[in-house]
Image: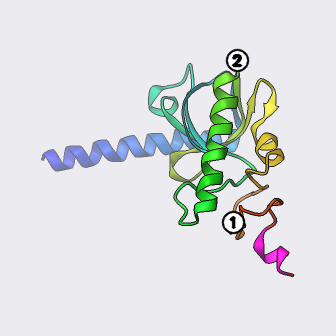
C-alpha cells in the first residue's frame, strides 16, 4: 500500500512539474531581478526566482542560451583551466551586478531553464564571447574546440 501511495505521489508531482515548466517553454518567460545562488561554470548556474512556487523557482538551474563554454570535467587540462577562468568571470560579473534578468526562458534538459542572461542590462553571452571563453552555440551537436588557441574556431573548420 505504501508503494502505491508513493508511486501516485511521484506521478502527481512529476506531471504537475512538467506541466508548469512546459508553460515556460511555450511562453518564453522572463524573470526579472533573480537572486544568484551559485555558479557551476561559464554557462551554468543556479538562482532563486522570487514570487514563484519554491518547487519551481528555488535553487533552479540555469543554462545560458546561445553559448557553449569549456567544460570543468574535461580530461584536457587546458580546457579545465579555461572552464575555471570562465566560471570566475561569470561569478564576478553576476555577484557584482545589482540586477540579474533572465529573458526568453525555455525548458531545457535536466529540469534547467535555458535563458538569455543579462546582468545590469549587459549580455552574459556577449561577455563570454568577447573574453574568448565561449562560442555561439544553439543546440544539436557540439563542435570540437581547441580552447588553447587564441581564436576559438571549431576544429573541423580550422583544419580545412
Could you tell me which residue is drawn at 70 percent across and 30 percent down?
A: 93
Q: Residues within 10 Å of mark 2 (few under 14, many from 20)?
A: few
Please tell me which residue is depicted at 26% across the width and 49% down the height of the picture.
7
Establish if 126 lies above or below 38: below
Camera-near label (2 vs 1) is 2
**Residue under circle 1?**
140
Residue 38 visible, this angle: yes
Question: In which quarter of the view is residue 106 placed?
Answer: top right
Which residue shows up at 70% across the image and 60% down it? 139
Q: Earlier in the sequence, mark 2 or mark 1?
A: 2
- The residue identified by callout 2 is 98
Specify the segment rendered in magenta: 154-159
Q: Looking at the figure, which quarter contains the C terminus?
A: bottom right
Nearest the viewer among 35 and 93 is: 93
Residue 156: say if magenta.
yes
Q: x%, y% of residue 14?
A: 41, 45
* Side (left or right) of 40 relative to 140: left
Q: Position of residue 137 (x, y in %)?
A: 75, 57
Colouring chosen for the image of the structure: rainbow
Q: Of helix, strand and loop, which one carries label 2? A: loop
Picture coordinates of residue 144, whole percent (x, y): 70, 70
Q: Quadrant of residue 78?
A: bottom right
Question: Residue 136 vs residue 142: left or right?
Answer: right
* Magenta span: chief secondary structure: helix
Are there few (<14), some (14-19), or many (20+) residues within 10 Å of tag 1?
few
Amino acid at each position: 500500500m505504501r508503494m502505491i501511495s508513493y508511486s501516485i505521489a511521484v506521478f502527481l508531482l512529476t506531471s504537475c512539474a512538467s506541466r508548469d515548466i512546459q508553460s515556460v517553454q511555450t511562453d518564453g518567460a522572463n524573470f526579472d531581478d533573480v537572486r544568484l545562488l551559485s555558479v557551476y561554470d561559464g554557462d551554468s548556474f543556479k538562482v532563486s526566482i522570487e514570487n514563484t512556487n519554491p518547487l519551481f523557482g528555488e535553487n533552479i538551474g540555469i543554462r545560458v542560451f546561445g553559448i557553449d563554454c569549456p567544460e570543468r570535467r574535461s580530461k584536457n587540462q587546458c580546457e579545465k583551466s579555461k572552464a575555471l577562468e570562465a566560471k570566475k568571470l561569470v561569478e564576478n560579473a553576476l555577484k557584482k551586478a545589482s540586477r540579474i534578468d533572465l529573458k526568453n526562458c525555455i525548458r531545457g534538459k535536466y529540469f534547467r531553464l535555458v535563458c538569455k542572461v543579462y546582468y545590469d542590462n549587459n549580455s552574459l553571452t556577449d561577455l563570454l564571447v568577447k573574453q574568448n571563453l565561449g562560442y555561439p552555440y544553439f543546440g544539436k551537436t557540439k563542435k570540437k574546440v581547441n580552447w588553447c588557441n587564441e581564436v576559438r574556431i571549431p576544429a573541423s573548420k580550422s583544419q580545412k
